[in-house]
Image: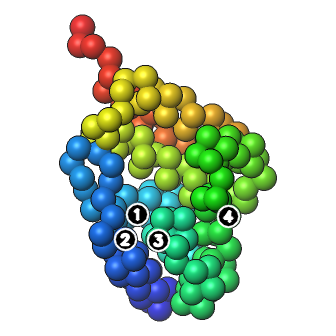
């Protein structure tokens, strides 16, 4: 029971930390929807047996997007959660193209749990590309994002078949969203 109280505390922290952040899509969804979706995907993939991974999913963008100190995450949610969040956090001091390249290069060295978190994150992002793409994203940019996400996930290797299936479905939906109706 205590573990799920921690999960709810993490959801509350994520909602507070990302309160003013919105998804880039035309629907301008609250960013916390993305965090909840990623957490839901990893919960399903682990049959609810890894609450620390669920917490890390809720907090996975806290350092990168909101500059929440690593030490705060560690103090409030423990070293396991903090390490997972750190493992999936990009170095924002680097150019975006370099960060994207490094996600592919570094993917094979990710722990299994961090890899699951990355797949869940990419799945959620692809679902957003399919249902509510950013207004300034051309068809080419959307397709390039799908290809890049596939490269990241392929580099992660086999992790969780159910999660990988959700990713494939999301990639297919994102690609289908730009195809002309026949």
Q: Position of residue 4 (x, y in %)?
A: 43, 83
Q: Is residue 98 above or below residue 179?
A: below
Q: Which labelled disc corresponds to residue 87?
A: 4
Q: Residue at x 49, y 41 (%)?
A: 167
Q: Position of residue 126 (x, y in %)?
A: 42, 40
Q: Which labelled disc corresponds to residue 35?
A: 1
Q: Is residue 118 above or below residue 86?
A: above
Density class for disc 1 (Cα within 10 Å; few <14, some 14-19, many ≥20) is: many
Give the CA distance from mark 1 to mark 2. Answer: 10 Å
Residue under numbered circle 2: 18
Density class for disc 3 (Cα within 10 Å; few <14, some 14-19, many ≥20) is: few
Quadrant of the rendering where the N terminus is positioned: bottom left
**Mark 3 or 4 closer to N-term?**
3
Quadrant of the rendering where the C terminus is positioned: top left
Q: Position of residue 72 (x, y in %)?
A: 57, 87
Element type where label 1 sits in the image: helix
Let me know if residue 60 appears in the view. no
Residue under numbered circle 3: 66
Q: How is the image coloured?
A: rainbow
Verify CB contact (< 8 Å) between mark 2 and mark 3: yes
**Mark 1 or 2 closer to N-term?**
2
Verify CB contact (< 8 Å) between mark 3 and mark 4: no
Q: Residue at x 58, y 80 (%)?
A: 69
Q: Residue at x 60, y 91 (%)?
A: 75
Of the two numbered discs 3 and 1 in the rendering, the one whose residue sits closer to the viewer: 3
Verify CB contact (< 8 Å) between mark 3 and mark 1: no
Element type where label 4 sits in the image: helix
């Amino acid at each position: 029971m205590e573990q799920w109280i921690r999960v709810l505390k993490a959801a509350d922290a994520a909602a507070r930390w990302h309160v003013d952040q919105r998804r880039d899509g035309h629907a301008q969804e609250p960013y916390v929807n993305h965090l909840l979706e990623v957490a839901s995907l990893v919960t399903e993939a682990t049959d609810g047996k890894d609450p620390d991974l669920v917490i890390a999913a809720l907090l996975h963008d806290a350092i990168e997007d909101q500059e929440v100190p690593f030490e705060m995450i560690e103090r409030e949610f423990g070293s396991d959660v903090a390490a997972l969040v750190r493992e999936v956090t990009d170095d924002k001091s680097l150019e975006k193209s370099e960060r994207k390249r490094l996600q592919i290069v570094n993917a094979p060295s990710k722990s299994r749990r961090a890899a699951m978190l990355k797949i869940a994150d990419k799945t959620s992002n692809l679902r957003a590309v399919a249902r509510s793409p950013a207004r300034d994203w051309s068809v080419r940019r959307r397709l390039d994002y799908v290809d890049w996400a596939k490269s990241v996930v392929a580099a992660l290797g086999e992790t969780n078949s159910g999660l990988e299936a959700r990713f494939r479905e999301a990639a297919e939906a994102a690609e289908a969203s730009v195809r002309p109706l026949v």
